């Protein structure tokens, strides 16, 4: 079971996240060579990107050079009819990975993955979409009109397309998070230089508290994002297969931190940030899609919470079965009951200890931050149990509740990653040499504690029904009805 699924059961599987993953030296050297050559190649063309953004298209020679460098190698793309909307690289891709329903009318969930090439009869490409951001990238509709697909073009097994899709999505979500990290780092560079060069009231704005607050939060969120994304990448490299929840969390957190960083960097730049001659407005437009790509953050929150709820539900079902059959198999029945009672007691008070409910491998200097995490983990398990008992099978439709649980899970996973990373830094460099990383951990721990406390409090005390009533009123009238004029 994955780290986060275990966490919702009140267990801290620290062996999964400690030690913090490190890249192999050979991989680091290879990756550095790729990144250095790519950076050099992109810098040589830096002046053209603004022009291409305005034109809404990359020139053919640029696309050809990217193909020659292998930059599209991460895209692993019967009779097929239908359309696929908003396909990235749709106008330039030579082959596609297509997921299509292959079950009958009574088997709507069956899906198969196919590999199709652009030259197959019946495939046509729609026009280039005019977008808010990432304007030069090719986004089109792909049309399929009686496309005949040979059996050898099935990717994986017939009817097993969902497994293939999840693997691709997990990789894509992690990669998207990596892109957000790079964007956040560049924005921190822009914002810090801008704040030092721009003066108001006789001194650089970098000396004012509100500007320091913005930049400090940008640094904390960049470090936290990097910690989470690198952790998921490390799990993938180590061969873990159950990391879908963690990958989804890293994508949600990274894309939302990137958006806040872009917004605050533009704010620091003030009027310059709104002008097209500076990079901020394009970054803001380009990064907005990250909260939609690879599954919208709203849907991913439901996925994160409901996946965890499924495990809690299985435990409750096992408990109910034990209660009904306790006299047939009293040893097994009482064993399950005692385990559940111990779990509930440990959630109610830290005086009752359970196995895997605490960190044992963290540096002693991190005890305070670890204790916060452990307290929140106990509360998370109790909250998941309480929510599922309250709503039962109807939990799928209780999106206010599932969102709160997902937000708690997101915060706790990222917090665990930051703890693990700082712990590794202390081991590698010594406590005296990582003071700024410890400061980041302390700030982030405080942020997590406040957000998590707020979400726990709203599980039973909230204004959900009032919000739904107001939304229904707006849907009914299709407008805001309280104009003053």
Image: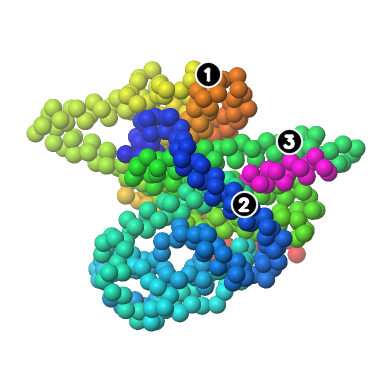
Q: Secondary structure at mark 3?
A: helix
Q: Is residue 343 left or right of residue 20?
A: left
Instruction: Choose mark 1 or mark 2, whichever is in front.
Output: 2
Above or below 248: residue 348 = above
Residue position for label 3: 212
Which sits earlier in the primary sequence, circle 3 or circle 2? 2
Which sits earlier in the primary sequence, circle 1 or circle 3? 3
Residue 462 shows which numbered tag? none
Which sits earlier in the primary sequence, circle 1 or circle 2? 2
Residue position for label 1: 365
Q: Residues within 10 Å of mark 3 (few under 14, many from 20)?
A: some
| Residue 445 x, y percent position in the rendering | 55, 30
Screen quadrant of the C terminus: bottom right
Q: Nearer the viewer, residue 283 or 479?
A: 283
Which range of residues does the magenta coloring cover?
184-198
At x 46%, y 42%, the residue is 27
């Amino acid at each position: 079971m994955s780290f986060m699924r275990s966490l919702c059961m009140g267990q801290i599987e620290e062996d999964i996240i400690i030690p913090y993953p490190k890249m192999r030296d050979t991989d680091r050297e290879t990756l550095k060579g790729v990144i250095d050559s790519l950076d050099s190649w992109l810098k040589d063309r830096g002046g053209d990107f603004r022009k291409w953004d305005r034109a809404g298209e990359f020139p053919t020679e640029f696309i050809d050079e990217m193909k020659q460098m292998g930059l599209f190698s991460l895209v692993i793309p019967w009779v097929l009819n239908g359309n696929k909307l908003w396909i990235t690289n749709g106008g330039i891709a030579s082959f596609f990975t297509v997921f299509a329903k292959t079950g009958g009318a009574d088997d709507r969930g069956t899906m198969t993955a196919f590999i199709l090439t652009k030259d197959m009869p019946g495939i046509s490409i729609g026009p280039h979409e005019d977008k808010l951001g990432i304007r030069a990238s090719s986004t089109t509709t792909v049309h399929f009109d009686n496309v005949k697909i040979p059996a050898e073009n099935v990717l994986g097994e017939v009817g097993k397309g969902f497994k293939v899709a999840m693997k691709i999505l997990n990789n894509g979500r992690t990669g998207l998070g990596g892109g957000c990290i790079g964007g956040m780092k560049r924005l921190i560079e822009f914002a810090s230089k801008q704040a030092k060069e721009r003066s108001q009231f006789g001194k650089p704005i970098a000396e004012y508290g509100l500007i320091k607050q913005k930049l400090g939060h940008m640094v904390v969120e960049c470090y936290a994002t990097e910690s989470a994304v690198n952790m998921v990448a490390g799990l993938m490299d180590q061969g873990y297969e159950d990391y879908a929840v963690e990958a989804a969390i890293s994508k949600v957190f990274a894309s939302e931190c990137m958006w806040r960083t872009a917004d605050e960097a533009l704010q620091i730049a003030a009027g310059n940030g709104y002008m097209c001659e500076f990079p901020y407005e394009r970054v803001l437009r380009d990064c907005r899609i990250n909260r939609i790509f690879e599954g919208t953050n709203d849907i991913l929150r439901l996925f994160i919470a409901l996946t965890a709820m499924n495990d809690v539900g299985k435990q409750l079902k096992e408990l109910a079965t034990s209660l009904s059959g306790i006299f047939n198999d009293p040893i097994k029945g009482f064993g399950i009951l005692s385990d559940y009672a111990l779990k509930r007691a440990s959630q109610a008070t830290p005086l009752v200890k359970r196995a895997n409910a605490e960190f044992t491998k963290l540096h002693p200097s991190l005890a305070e931050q670890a204790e916060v995490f452990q307290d929140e983990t106990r509360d998370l398990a109790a909250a998941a149990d309480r929510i599922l008992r309250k709503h039962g099978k109807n939990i799928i439709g209780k999106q206010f509740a599932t969102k709160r649980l997902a937000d708690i899970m997101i915060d706790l996973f990222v917090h665990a990653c930051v703890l693990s990373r700082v712990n590794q830094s202390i081991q590698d460099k010594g406590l005296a040499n990582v003071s700024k990383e410890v400061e980041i951990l302390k700030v982030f721990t405080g942020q997590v504690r406040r957000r998590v406390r707020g979400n726990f409090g709203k599980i039973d005390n909230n204004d959900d029904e009032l919000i739904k009533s107001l939304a229904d009123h707006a849907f009914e009238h299709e407008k805001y009805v309280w104009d003053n004029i």
